[in-house]
Image (cartoon, rainbow, N blue to C red):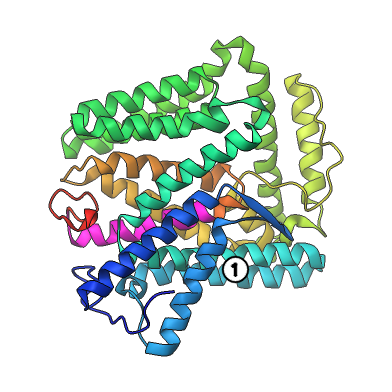
Amino acid sequence: MFPPNATRSSFGSIALFESETTGREIRFLSGISAVLAGFLTAFTVSVVGEMPVGEFVLIALAGWVAINLLVTKEWPCDLLRHKLLWILLGAQALGMCGYIFSDLYHGSSIRDIARGWGRMGFLWIDILAFGYLVGCSPRNFYWYFIAQIAGDGVHTILDGALFGDWWKFGAGVPFTYLVLALSIRGGLWSTILVSAFAAVLHFAMDFRSFGGICLFAAALTGLRLFPRHLRLWVMPVMLIAILAAFLIYPQIRASDAHRSTRSDVSRSSMIIAAWEGIRDHPLSGNGSWFSNTDVLQNFMLIRQERARIAHVGGFPEANERAGTVAFHTQILVSIAEGGIFGGAFFIIFGALLVRALYRLTFSKLWHGHYAIISLFLVSALWNVGFSPFSGAQRVYIAAACGVLLLLEVEGKRPGFVGGKKSNEFFQ
């Protein structure tokens, strides 16, 4: 795919290859790969479970990294040598070991073992591939992300929006990032106001999760209006206000209250069932997809009871089988399935997301790109707690790992990611 004679240069400049011509070729081809991976992630094929087509591009990139390492005895880019990348990869490898032990201990079905181990293995590969992509050029993350949004749009147009909701499952997220990208040229106040406006709009359109994400990102950006020594004191007040808005707003809109309550019942039941699975088997877990344990049955009972109390009626999926329900919590389901070791990656990943957002919020410097990066990382943090760990989410997790790597470099070279003090971001 890429020239095998490319050699490594200094990490400090991230000009990853000694030959200028080869460097341009690598950046161009890696950019094309980033676009393909992003655009095709919305489309899936059935391989045991649903697998994003864009993941095949990432697998090919990881294969190229392995071939280059075997042939030249060198990493194809210096970012692949970074300690943070190997912390993430090592945590995911430990998670895989946790899943293997749990499935053997509980005697999980072969199909669910294949899905569980494949999910863990593919995430490891995806993280490595994104390390390579952003190591070739930091702007590859943006190429990927723009293409991902475009791919989601095309997929929605071709297949229609889920549940017929064209805002929540179609235009909402692309619109937000577009107006945010336009607002950053207006400075800090413009970015804050646009983020807050997007939050209100999402709440009005009954897209509560992304409304809360936008509101939280706006608050983090708004903290920059205060002196640094006051930001830690102001932050808890903002978090309480956001939580109150998130919980109270659906009650104001009576027409949405029933649907919102049903959603809350289902998600909270998943969290309770996963937590009880962790409590019962903290080390051994409950096996991939809970195929040979009672976690799923417990979820059904909890959901039925909570639905009765909330007066929202039953659910059509009352007789779902093990292996057919994706719990909407990445960190809890990984620990519930693979034990505490099975969740090692998400524990570290979640902590690194919080650390990165803290550093962005309390950094002395400000770049407009930080608003987009903050929104992306807040979304990733939300997904750790409240989104399933399957399909396209693997690619999104790996992309967030790529951003974490770039921000780690940014900590050593201020202005690198934002591009204000360095032109490398746009090379």
Q: In the picture, residue 254 is in which quadrant?
A: top right
**Residue plotted at (47% across, 58% down):** 398
**Residue plotted at (68% across, 72% down):** 100
In the rendered image, the quadrant that contains the C terminus is bottom left
Residue 411 within the segment the image draws in magenta: yes
Q: Nearer the viewer, residue 4 or 118?
A: 4
Q: Nearer the viewer, residue 276 or 271?
A: 271
The answer to whether one can see residue 108 in this image is no
Residue 426 within the segment the image draws in magenta: no
Q: Position of residue 89 (x, y in %)?
A: 47, 70
Q: In the picture, residue 159 is in which quadrant?
A: top right
Q: Residue furthest left?
A: 421
| Badge 1 amino acid | Gly
Q: Callout 1: few (<14), some (14-19), or many (20+) C-alpha neighbours within 10 Å?
A: some
Q: In the picture, residue 237 is in which quadrant?
A: top left
Q: Is residue 263 above or below residue 72?
A: above
Magenta part, dominant SS: helix
Q: Which residues are magenta?
A: 395-414
**Residue plotted at (15% across, 45% down):** 364
Q: Is residue 131 above or below residue 19?
A: above
Q: Nearer the viewer, residue 279 or 263?
A: 263
Residue 9 horizontal side relative to residue 85, left or right:
left
Q: Is residue 102 above or below residue 250?
A: below
Report which residue position mark 1 lands on: 121
